[in-house]
Image (cartoon, rainbow, N blue to C red):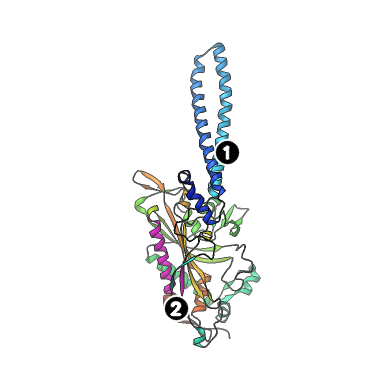
């Protein structure tokens, strides 16, 4: 959530942020009104309580008619205090509810618009000309079948659409990607973490995933638990309700976890293969930093993502995501999109978001800086979303005979293999 004090002092900035996101601007005025009622009812409650305490001191000293009058007044005052308390609680609850609906303030440099209004910042690598090489590229599912690596038919039989098996060298390729990604993150100073896949509602809400993203979340009603769509959620909640010492910052974690997404609203999109699925594994970077360091940390996370994709020898571009596609928690987001030959376009492989103080306020994570205790900033960045990375590797590194070149960074985790060979023709 954002700072209420900032809302009061500069509501136009918050309105502009909501407008840029394509969200309800009227929410800002509703929140301002609720906050004013919360504060005024709080003042009235305090005044009535003070009057009640003062009256309580007079009653024992009074007698006769005077005492009877004071007791009558005390009875009325007790009713007024109770009403003021209820009014204060209602206004406080309304304020908190409205505040949770408000997205993070977007960074002023974020391009304004929808999904297609991003700005391309960089392009890396060379897109292969398969025509010049004399063959038509196969898509990842055809390659995965040749390699004995991907089985979507049995995935659908066992679990339904958008589920799959990674088999043989496909399973080994996932393990190689995960191990190589964790090795890079560990070398960069991240603490490796294996995180829970099920979290409580306060963890999911605290990271901002029960707002506009709620339709993509799986919930276990009987247990009041949620399946995470990313290890960002348990990593953000890891220090919930804690006060950290400033000299411990930055704290950096690399979480590996299964991820579950309903993919609501994606009917008909990416139905072939394993690009868009309901369950996948991912290595996620997560940072806790002082607020003034968040933009620099954001660039560091992006640099680690670029190094990873470069080590996989994938052609990719970096985009500055537009305001309407940020998600509630992010003030700014950069995506790295790899070229997918058979689609003829770049597709998202990694994403890194600067969430500033938005999540830490909701999760009550603070740091002690001298005599001050204040919210810190949180950031997240995908290092390796496994299925999409497999898609990019198979399609970009395929050979005419259906074999696939293995980048050197993965070979130590694949028994030294330089090429993945077809097992079926």
Q: Which of marks 2 and 1 precedes in the sequence?
A: 1
Identity of the residue drawn at 46% across and 73% down: 316
Q: Is residue 364 magenta?
A: no
Tell me where the magenta segment starts and ends, as one range. 293-318
Q: Position of residue 66 (x, y in %)?
A: 54, 13
Alpha-carbon span between mark 1 and mark 2: 59 Å
The residue indicated by pointer 2 is 126
In front here: 266 or 158?
266
The relative height of residue 94 versus residue 197 in the rendered view (above or below) is above
- The nearer-to-camera label among 1 and 2 is 2
The residue indicated by pointer 1 is 90
| Category of crowding for the residue at label 2, using alpha-carbon neighbours closer than 10 angstroms: few (below 14), some (14–19), many (at least 20) | few
In front here: 271 or 181?
271
Identity of the residue drawn at 48% across and 22% down: 54
Decide if residue 114 is on the left or right side of residue 154. Answer: left
Q: Position of residue 131 (x, y in %)?
A: 52, 85
Q: Position of residue 402 (x, y in %)?
A: 53, 84
Q: Quadrant of residue 294?
A: bottom left
Q: Position of residue 313 (x, y in %)?
A: 44, 76
């Amino acid at each position: 959530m954002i700072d209420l004090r900032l809302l009061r002092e500069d509501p136009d900035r918050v309105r502009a942020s909501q407008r840029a996101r394509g969200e309800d601007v009227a929410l800002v005025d509703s929140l301002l009104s609720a906050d004013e009622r919360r504060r005024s009812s709080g003042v009235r409650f305090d005044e009535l309580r003070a009057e009640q305490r003062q009256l309580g001191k007079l009653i024992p000293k009074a007698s006769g008619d005077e005492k009877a009058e004071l007791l009558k007044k005390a009875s009325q005052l007790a009713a007024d205090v109770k009403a003021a308390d209820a009014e204060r609680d209602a206004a406080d609850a309304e304020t908190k509810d409205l505040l949770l609906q408000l997205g993070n303030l977007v960074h002023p440099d974020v391009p304004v618009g929808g999904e297609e209004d991003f700005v391309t910042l960089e392009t890396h690598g060379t897109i292969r000309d398969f025509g010049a090489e004399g063959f038509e590229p196969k898509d990842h599912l055809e390659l995965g079948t040749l390699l004995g690596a991907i089985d979507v038919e049995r995935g659908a039989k066992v679990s339904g659409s958008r589920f799959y098996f990674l088999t043989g060298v496909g399973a080994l390729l996932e393990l190689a990607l995960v191990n190589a990604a964790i090795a890079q993150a560990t070398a960069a100073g991240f603490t490796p973490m294996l995180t829970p896949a099920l979290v409580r509602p306060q963890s999911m809400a605290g990271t901002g995933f029960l707002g506009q993203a709620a339709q993509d979340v799986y919930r276990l009603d009987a247990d009041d638990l949620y399946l995470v769509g990313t290890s960002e959620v348990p990593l953000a909640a890891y220090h919930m309700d804690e006060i950290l010492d400033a000299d411990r910052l930055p704290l950096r974690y690399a979480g590996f976890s299964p991820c579950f997404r309903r993919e609501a609203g994606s009917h008909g999109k990416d139905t072939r293969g394993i690009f868009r699925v309901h369950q996948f594994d991912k290595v996620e970077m997560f940072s806790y930093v002082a607020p003034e360091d968040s933009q620099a940390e954001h660039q560091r996370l992006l640099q680690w993502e670029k190094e990873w994709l470069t080590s996989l020898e994938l052609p990719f571009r970096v985009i500055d995501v537009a305001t309407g596609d940020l998600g509630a928690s992010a003030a700014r987001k950069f995506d790295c999109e790899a070229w997918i030959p058979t689609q003829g376009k770049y597709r998202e492989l990694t994403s890194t978001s600067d969430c500033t103080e938005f999540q830490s306020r909701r999760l009550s994570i603070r740091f002690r800086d001298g005599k001050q205790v204040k919210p810190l900033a949180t950031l997240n960045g995908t290092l390796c979303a496994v299925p999409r990375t497999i898609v990019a590797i198979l399609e970009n590194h395929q050979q005419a005979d259906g074999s696939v070149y293995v980048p050197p960074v993965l070979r130590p985790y694949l028994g030294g293999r330089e090429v993945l060979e077809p097992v079926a023709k």
